[in-house]
Amino acid sequence: MSRLPEHLRQAVRARTEAAEKRARVALATMAKAREPISFAAVARTAAVSTDFLYRHLELRTLIERHRKKSGAGIGARPDPQPSESSTSAAVRALSARLSQQQREHREEVARLRKALEVAQGENLALRRKLAEYE
């Protein structure tokens, strides 16, 4: 795998830093307003992915600390803890949905082929009958 050119590395770094800053601002704003804090809520407010928040150790720790302070962790469903090698939940959900749609389309194509075969057979029979009358 080739290394990225310096200008692309800088762009990636700037984008990551901007996302981190948005997440920190969102977390501070939510804490100040005493809104319930969760990974999904912070991600939604900051316009970042939950995967980004989970993978960023410092942000993850801050969010978990705020959740414990606000008592959101008590009785609430805990957010999943993905491992470094796991794919994001969104990718898994979309993959499952795509697989289901592919199955449905294959079944529909099979039904349509069968109906086409029947229609072609009927068409052939009608043409033969018509040829007899001519």
Image (cartoon, helix red, strand yellow):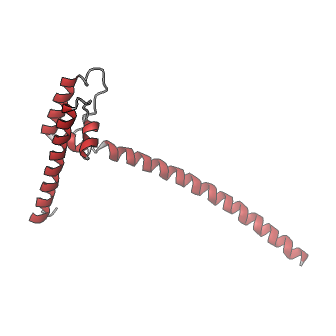
Q: Is residue 50 left or right of residue 100?
A: left
Q: Quadrant of the C terminus?
A: bottom right
Q: Nearer the viewer, residue 92 or 32?
A: 32
Residue placed at 28% from the left, 28% from the top?
Answer: 78
Residue placed at 47% from the left, 47% from the top?
Answer: 100
Q: Position of residue 69 (x, y in %)?
A: 18, 24
Q: Nearer the viewer, residue 98 or 61?
A: 61
Indicate whether 92 appears above or below 119. Answer: above
Q: Nearer the viewer, residue 35 or 48?
A: 35
Q: Residue furthest top?
A: 75
Q: Where on the picture, by quarter, is residue 70?
A: top left
| Mark count | 0
Q: Position of residue 57 (x, y in %)?
A: 14, 38
Q: Position of residue 5 (x, y in %)?
A: 11, 66
Residue placed at 32% from the left, 42% from the top?
Answer: 89
Q: Position of residue 28 (x, y in %)?
A: 17, 36
Q: Quadrant of the N terminus?
A: bottom left
Instruction: Answer yes or no: is residue 84 visible.
Output: no
